Amino acid sequence: MRSSLLWGLAVWSVWAQAAAAVESPTPEQLDFFEKRIRPVLVTHCYACHATDSPQVKGSLLLDTRAGVRRGGESGEIVVLGDPDASLLIKALKYADDAPAMPPRKQLSPEVIADFEKWVKLGAPDPREGAAATIRHEIDIEKGRKHWSFVAPREVPPPEVKDTAWPRTTIDRHLLAALERDGLKPVEDADPAMLVRRVYLDLVGLPPSPEETQTWIQKLKAESRKLEENATTRDSAAFSSQLSAFDSLLTSLLSSPRFGERWGRHWLDVARFAETSGRQINFNYPQAWRYRDWVIAALNADLPYDEFVRQQLAGDLLPATNDEQRAQQLIATGFLAIGPKPHSERDPLQFEMDLVDEQIDVTTQAFLGLTVACARCHDHKFDPVPQRDYYALAGVFRSTETCYGTIRIIQSLNPTPLHELPANCAAPSALPQLSSDELGTIKQKLHDVKTRYDER
């Protein structure tokens, strides 16, 4: 008990001394600041943490007492009288739980000790004036000049020293970069390795031993022709001699496995799942239709612009028959799948969260931008103002998203499914329920709801 009391008195004594230093620092304390602290701040900190800095880092200003007290984006940096709890001291010591400051070179132990003493004294500081307000103004027009927002232009292929190696203009760009770094291309893969690589790349499965031997024999025959015409590697004659390799590629690109192999990458981008996720995880029994549409689109080599258009507005596109109409409706599953807060009680909140998720997946998938960041503020890194976000939100809000759930406990925002045309020949994974079966299910749901309401 006595030791605890003494410890409390000691802590109170340190705090009291620090508070007194803040209110009325002594001449010795001010002299210590001017000789030991201010010069270090000016030399090592003001470049990034002063009002006149070209770009204030971490919203932290160290050129006024008020700025030191306020801290920055990481919170307060000084706990008066307690160096061990002060983020400033942790940063100077390069502690694991703090950013290293200054970042390029650590200060000497003597200087760090001076700052520890200064904090223990209560960080006496004669500098007057309020801390400036840090405003993060976003230059939208300047951001749009970034190379990723500028239309690409044709660039002539670079000159290379080894003119015999390139077979296409892409090869010349690759070789130029290798030569610039003093490197050389590796040797061509042997036939067995080439066949295995192409199989794994295009269909995701290794070839069987029989397939390997068949293609090796064809490629070796072509290789002998290449050796006889080694001087024509970059000519039309060389291209005509690749019939075996072209046949290998054509056979794999025509395989249904190609769409399955590469469709999975798009399904990851489209956040495909057969359940809704979030707080309440509901099944989407018809989600497989969108998955199969993606695989079929890749196998049919659907042009990319049409691939995008059907997923965003397939229900609005013209169709020549019921089957095409059905496939375009299924493509819009891109917007219907995905996580949803089904238990949200506020319909408007649910609607805006749904729209936000659609904006997020659409802009990430097709633009490579996290536009959803602009829901609450202008984007911090990309030229996307908040008004553009809500312009998109207006478009998505004017549509109806059908994902097929019913109103039950914790499913408060149900919707129907799109009805596919009757003559579309679309397969059905679920048998049609009879009226009796449907009535039984509804009765069971009613009984569960009744028991729930009686609790």
Image (cartoon, rainbow, N blue to C red):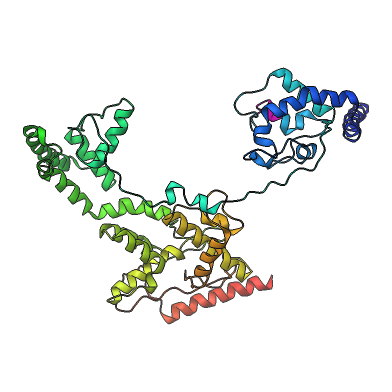
Where is residue 103, by image quadrant?
top right
Return the x and y of residue 188 as percentages of the image width and height: 20, 32
Residue 217 is covered by the magenta coloring: no
Residue 307 appears in the picture as rendered: yes
Return the x and y of residue 36 as percentages of the image width and height: 77, 22
Q: Residue at x 90, y 35 (%)?
A: 23
Q: Write the start and end of the magenta stretch as one range.
A: 90-95
Residue 430 appears in the picture as rendered: no
Q: Nearer the viewer, residue 407 or 225?
A: 225
Is 361 rendered above or below residue 405? Answer: above
| Quarter occupied by the C terminus | bottom right
Q: Residue at x 37, y 69 (%)?
A: 314
Q: Residue at x 11, y 44 (%)?
A: 236
| Horizontal arrangement in the rendering, residue 77 relative to residue 257 (left or right) | right
| Quarter occupied by the N terminus | top right
Q: Looking at the image, how many numbered discs can be counted on the residues?
A: 0
Return the x and y of residue 405 as percentages of the image width and height: 50, 70
Where is residue 185, by image quadrant?
top left
Q: Nearer the viewer, residue 414 or 175?
A: 175
| Horizontal arrangement in the rendering, residue 101 relative to residue 243 (left or right) | right
Q: Residue furthest bottom?
A: 435
Q: Nearer the viewer, residue 246 or 177?
A: 177
Return the x and y of residue 315 as percentages of the image width and height: 39, 73
| Horizontal arrangement in the rendering, residue 215 relative to residue 420 (left or right) | left
Q: Nearer the viewer, residue 410 or 350?
A: 350
